[in-house]
Image (cartoon, rainbow, N blue to C red):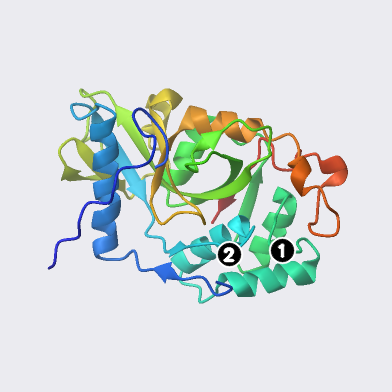
Amino acid sequence: MELIPLPPPFPLLPKEGSSNNLPKSENTKGNGVAIELDTVELWIKLNGKINDTFMVVWQNTPTILQNGPQCGLVALAMAAQSHGQAIDTDSIFQKALNMGITKKGELFSSFATCELATCIEMKPLLLNDGFHDAEVLLRYLISDKMLLVPYDADCNHAPCLKNGHKAHWALLIGVLFQVDNSFNHNNGCCSRELLRQNIYRISDVHANCDLPSQVDKENIYFLAKHGKSKRLAIWSYNSLQASNNNLQEVDPKRVNDLEYVLPPNNNLADLRDKVIVLR
């Protein structure tokens, strides 16, 4: 098999960070798994954690780039396609238009986004205080669920604090978390496969698995995809939580009722602190 070159380093990643009307998608099966694993290994090296032990889980997910303010639609399309649905961003956009929840692809309401997800035969669950309990989110991700999360995106697409002026949607397709090097890897609560040095992929997680309860949120890192980059992004729990919690208002430059479906008083209360579980 032809070797795939290592992807270029994430911009601005010394410690932490990121990384068409009919959008193009990339097949992530087969050698796509190697690319994502290479990205995880590179992130671990760049952050000086090569001697630490990590658990990782992710869902094979296509990459779709957005055309205009379609980040939420693209995230839904990636999730739907990963579940085997033959649906594209344009089809989801038409459904959203018919529902009256968007004009150009923007989605400023998590409730409306859940309704849209239901229309494309997904089973969304809206968490109103999404980041309050790290163990809950970790359990969803290691149980093969994906999370749809609004946040402020910086120039390199990493989470930032812009008061909601750079609001963006990302799809969390997996999670990387650090465990103590003395952790018992054979306690039977899930299957573990050694992928690379000190990197284990977990699967077949039992409902009563106590692994999530043993992980501090400071050691949790999300694996994310979004419509503005082909690269897998890796963000800390704390940085994404802070960005999600700071969503206050629509960017004043975008406040135009003729162009967008905006929330009441331009308040992003229906994005702030919200996480959508996609099942």
Q: Residue at x 66, y 35 (%)?
A: 273
Question: Residue 37 vs residue 271: left or right?
Answer: left
Quadrant of res 188:
top left
Residue extending farthest left: 1
Q: Is residue 199 above or below residue 35?
A: above
Q: Residue at x 70, y 49 (%)?
A: 110
Task: Looking at the image, tell me whether mark 1 or mark 2 is earlier in sequence order.
Answer: 2
Coordinates of residue 175 in the picture (x, y in percent): 39, 42
Q: Which mark is residue 67?
A: 2
Element at label 1: loop
Proximity of marks 1 and 2: CB atoms separated by less than 8 Å: no
Instruction: Locate the N terminus by quadrant.
Output: bottom left
Element at label 2: loop
Query: What type is the residue that disc 2 sits on?
Result: Asn
Quadrant of res 179:
top left
Coordinates of residue 230 in the picture (x, y in percent): 41, 57
Query: What type is the residue that disc 1 sits on?
Result: Lys
Give the residue at mark 1.
Answer: 104
Q: Residue at x 33, y 50 (%)?
A: 204
